Amino acid sequence: MPHLADLYRSASLLVQNSPEAEDLVQEVYLEAWKSFHRFEPGTNCRAWLFKILFHRLHHLRRRLIKTSKLEAFATPADEDNLMAEPPIPQEIQDDDILRALERVPLEFREVVLMADVEEFSYKEIAATLKIPLGTVMSRLSRARKLLRQELAEVAGLYGIGPSNERNREGNSA
Amino acid sequence: MKVLNFDSKQCERVRRQLDAYLSNELLVETTSEVLKHLESCEACSRELGSRQRVREALQKAATRQLPPDHLREAIHRRLRSTQPRMFSGFRATTWAVALASLALVMLAGQQWLGFERGRQLVASVLTLGVSDHLHCAIRGRNYPELANPPEQLGEKLGPQYAGLLPVVQEKLPGFQLLEAHICSVPGSPRRYVHFIARGQGTILSVILTKREGEFLPAGRLLVAGAPTGVNLYKAKLEATSVAGFETNEYFGFVVSDLGQDEMMQLAASLAPALRDALDGSAGTEKATPALLLASVSVDSNRGVE
């Protein structure tokens, strides 16, 4: 099963629910089998499968929005682009970065995952998500910044995060 | 609240480039400018370090998300159950042919991906040579109008590399060796042994740098050539051509704005001589059967590829 690990990894980080991620990946392969005649030999098979993944994900999201089970994409205020850089811990724990990622809105999370985890080029991301190259660049920049801010908060570096509470609890125990 | 916490306009400009730099999406020239600034700006270097740490932490944490063992079987089961609906008018043999076709297509995709990654690997290694040539020889003009005497060049190179001077001069007929030194590109600890020569109306660099665990891929990127035992790779960035090779411990580059064929001829002559001089007897023992050539294309939007 080609690229199963890559697809599952992205799906689970995007939908943040294991059974849903499994369903999503199954849908991807099902769709790939159905439409394999559309795949052009010699082009990038991995990118094609990811394109299907995001198509399914966006379809699912639109359906959930229609049935009011979900809010539309939350867009952080523009102002945060100009905020000072958040402090980043020297040692970053896996759980902290994953919790920070969960807090990044989906439209930004998907771009940072494609660029930093799956290491697709800007051009491939633009083609997969069907957005202009400039949007990829601005969303990625924004996504990384949001991730750093959430990480600083999760890791307790602003003095108000859960890790800070965790540390206090640990100290008092 | 709006806080602009930058030291200068230059810092602000470089910080805007850091995301593209992290994604390896900058042109070689812009990368060089960013690296130059980072070398002299501690605040921006720290900022880059923070961003790299977050990126690496995300990659590491994401690899923990492994598909459960039952998922593969669940996909197969679902595909089997969907089969009659999907191919209601098909015979079983047609279905089998379709499955086999998809498997082949997937396999071709994987091979293509491997090839693409190999191309990117070659590009990233060859970029080392191009960066140093552009930074030190072209922009920095770190060579005299009249050639430095050989003994002075020998002193600059030190005992480890002084012996390479006659090798380089001999293998560059029609070129005058103007300069030789050890240099680096701002922002990187990597050291380059840099020979700068003038000839055929242009400036040419011969650059060596120690391999730090990297290697150049073989396979489909290579085309058999003359039997000199060193693999050669080539790329072109706008007017700059680079031919690269690897020895047991070093990468070597020949960089100039000459045509790619001329560059490959020079590299084919230089590579075995430099390999023998650098690796000594170990180089000859490990000689490969043929001179192999790899060609890498260039996308002007993304730099050397």
Image (cartoon, coloured by chain):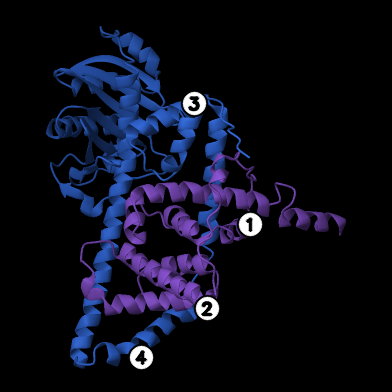
Chain colours: A purple, B blue
**SS label for mark 2:** helix
Q: Which chain carries label 3?
A: B
**SS label for mark 4:** helix
Q: Is residue B255 visible?
A: yes
Indicate whether A40 appears above or below A152: below
Which residue is denoted by mark 2 in the rendering?
A19
Callouts 3 and 4 close, C-beta under 8 Å: no
Callouts 1 and 4 close, C-beta under 8 Å: no
Which residue is denoted by mark 4 in the rendering?
B81
User: Could you tell me which residue is drawn at 46 percent across and 38 percent down?
Assistant: B18
- In the rendered structure, the answer to whether residue B298 lies left or right of residue B280 reads left
Judging depth in this view, the residue of A143 and A115 nearest the camera is: A143
Indicate whether A71 appears above or below A30: above
- In three-dimensional space, the C-alpha distance between marks 3 and 1, rounded to whole angstroms, equals 34 Å
Indicate whether A142 appears above or below B104: above
> Residue A14 placed where, x, y %?
50, 65
What is the quadrant of the N terminus of chain A in the image? bottom left
Mark 2, other Cα within 10 Å: few <14 / some 14–19 / many ≥20: few
Image-quadrant location for residue B191: top left
Eye-nearest disc, 3 or 4: 3
Three-letter code for the amino acid on which mark 2 is drawn:
Pro
Which residue is denoted by mark 1 in the rendering?
A96
Instruction: Evaluate whether label 3 is on the same chain as label 1.
Output: no
- In three-dimensional space, the C-alpha distance between marks 1 and 4, rounded to whole angstroms, equals 40 Å
User: For residue B9, which numbered disc appears in the image?
Assistant: 3
Three-letter code for the amino acid on which mark 1 is drawn:
Asp
